[in-house]
Amino acid sequence: MALILLLLGILVNVLVFTDGQSVGVCYGEFGAPLPSPEDVVNLYKTNGITRMRIYAPNQTTLRALGGTNIELILDVPNGSLQSLTDPNTATTWVRNNVLNYRNVKFRYISVGNEVDPDDPKTQRFKTFVLPAMINVHNALKDAGLANQIKVSTATYTGLLKLSHPPSDGVFDDNVIGYIRPIIAFLAETGSPMLANIYPYFAYIGTPKEYQDLPFALFTRSTPAYDDKGRKYYNLFDAMYDAHYAAQSRLGGANVEIVVSESGWPSFGQEVATRDNAGTYYRNLISHLKSSSGTPVRPRRSIETYLFAMFDENNKTGSVTEKHFGVFFPDKVPKYGLRF
């Protein structure tokens, strides 16, 4: 009996530990100089990072991933979406970038990233996303991989009209016609919603008199507010639950949410400091590994991808966009995170 109890205890610990391994890191390449893809894959392996997201098919990276245990989110870039509305082109894309790499552990295909019907920079892509998703899914299905590799698209909390309190989360009126059929596709195929969730951007976008830095950095010891009996200690959970409430209103109550990006910059703005960024990443990882879930969805492991592996000095936009890396380009850890 003692031996059986010991073995059960070990099994439980293994299951909990495995379930908690939900932290991946996005591998962006808008920087120079950066390590070679082979060196980057080795850096993932030596740091125990078992999940990666890349934003376009990079043949060198895919070859380097072959035979490793690193699971991958592979993006279809927004600029390629229109071409994949043709089923034959989608079949070719899947053959060239997935089937040709049978020893790569593809987890999800993200068909587009942060396409927003209200954003002039991405609204031209909105009619391409769902047809491209369907065609990529069908190509995977024809190859016998539809149950193994799920097709989704990466959204973001900017699509929400209301997010506070989380239970009032709802998509913007102009977004509903775009997102509802996508949610229906995800529900039908058993695929997750990919969502980029950044407490940093929510914090700096809040009027100063209402800003709560401890809430954004997971350092509050008391709840910031109570939403119908649910107490919120951190902004990450609040944003996650708001997104879940919004998709639930459109038939997505059973669609899991995978956080496909989350991070904090270390330079370029008043709260974009190395100390704050390190605090955010360490506390986020600790929160994820606890498998405590959120107030709406407790005791769940939230699969999350940190953004990003390296600082990317070639990025456009604000200075902060260049400083989200958890490693320096010379592979030196910026925060000493334990993955």
Image: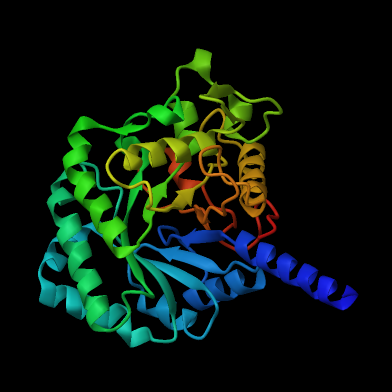
Frontmost residue, 59 versus 301: 301
In the rendered image, the vertical position of residue 204 relative to residue 18, given as above or below: above
In the displayed structure image, the side of residue 336 where residue 120 appears, left or right: left
Residue drawn at x 64%, y 67% as measured from the top left: 18
Which percent across, then down, holds residue 75? 33, 64
Judged left or right of residue 119, residue 327 is: right
- In the rendered image of this protein, does residue 191 appear above or below residue 7? above
Residue at image coords 18%, 73%: 90
Colour scheme shown: rainbow
117 is higher (above) or lower (below) than 65:
above
> Quick check: can you spot residue 268?
no
Residue at the farthest front position: 1
Q: Is residue 61 left or right of residue 336?
A: left
User: For the view shown, which residue lies furthest in the right direction?
Assistant: 2
Q: Quadrant of residue 332?
A: bottom right
Q: In front here: 49 or 18?
A: 18
Q: x%, y% of residue 148?
A: 39, 75
x, y percentage for residue 3? Answer: 87, 77
State the image coordinates of residue 107 (x, y, percent, origin top left).
42, 70
**Residue at 57 percent of width and 41 percent of height:** 266
- Between residue 236 and residue 68, name the one nearer to us: 236
User: Can you say whether 19 is above or below 175 in the image?
Assistant: below
Q: Is residue 314 visible?
A: yes
If the image is split into quadrants, where does the N terminus sit?
bottom right
